[in-house]
Image: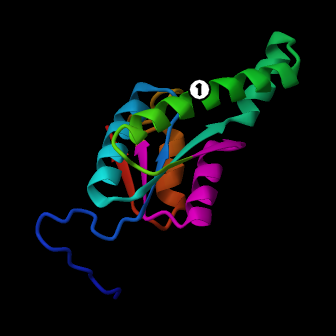
Amino acid sequence: MKDVHYCAPGEIFCRANKVLLAVDGSEGSSRAATVAIELAELTESKLFIIHVIPTPVVEQFSMMSDSDPVVVLEKYEQRGRLLLDGYKKAAEEHKIEVETILERGSISERIIAQSREIGSDIIVIGYEGATGGYRTGLGSATERVLLGTECPVLVVK
């Protein structure tokens, strides 16, 4: 059995130093951002904000619309940078140290890999993302992150 670590009353998430927030532009990720910013502020943690460009979706869209995949990818990257910059600005207004991460690939795989790489203490993610619900409403990327990571995951509904 692992050791149980006690935090003093009022010291929620006392061991958190690195918070990873996953965003996709959805209402769910906006709510998750509010919680992650508050958590980072309360714990004086560094906030890492990740946005993953789903390359399989880009490839499929390019093929179905007869568009140049490079042009489509560039548009996704521009949107991703704008999204990350907006969340970064909101967090910095609360005097939080922020680092943004723009990735390409499988959403859940890249979130899990970045969480491991930075050594995040907690991942904050929306209950459902831009693609909508999955089975009982939990987003498929959210479910995969929950199942694939070893650190705590805070799912915001």
Q: Is residue 8 left or right of residue 134?
A: left
- Locate the N terminus by quadrant: bottom left
- Locate the C terminus by quadrant: top left
Q: Is residue 34 above or below residue 26?
A: below
Residue 77 in percent (x, y) is at 71, 29
Residue 64 in percent (x, y) is at 81, 15
Q: Residue at x 11, y 69 (%)?
A: 9
Q: Residue furthest left?
A: 9
Q: Is residue 116 above or below residue 88?
A: below
Residue 109 covered by magenta stretch: yes
Please indicate, yes or no, whether residue 133 appears anywhere in the rendered image: yes
Residue underneath mark 1 = 82
Residue 103 covered by magenta stretch: yes
Q: Which residues are magenta?
A: 100-125
Q: Residue at x 40, y 65 (%)?
A: 17
> Residue 142 versus residue 112: which sits nearer the camera?
112
Q: How is the image coloured?
A: rainbow
Please indicate, yes or no, whether residue 134 appears anywhere in the rendered image: no
Q: Is residue 21 left or right of residue 75?
A: left
> Residue 82 versus residue 59: which sits nearer the camera?
82
Q: Residue at x 61, y 57 (%)?
A: 114
Q: Secondary structure at mark 1?
A: helix
Q: Residues within 10 Å of mark 1 (few under 14, many from 20)?
A: few
Q: Quadrant of residue 27?
A: top left
Q: Residue at x 69, y 25 (%)?
A: 78
Residue 92 in percent (x, y) is at 42, 41
**Looking at numbered disc 1 in the image, what kind of residue is underneath it?**
Leu
Figure disc tally? 1
Q: Is residue 122 above or below residue 111?
A: below
Residue 90 in percent (x, y) is at 40, 34
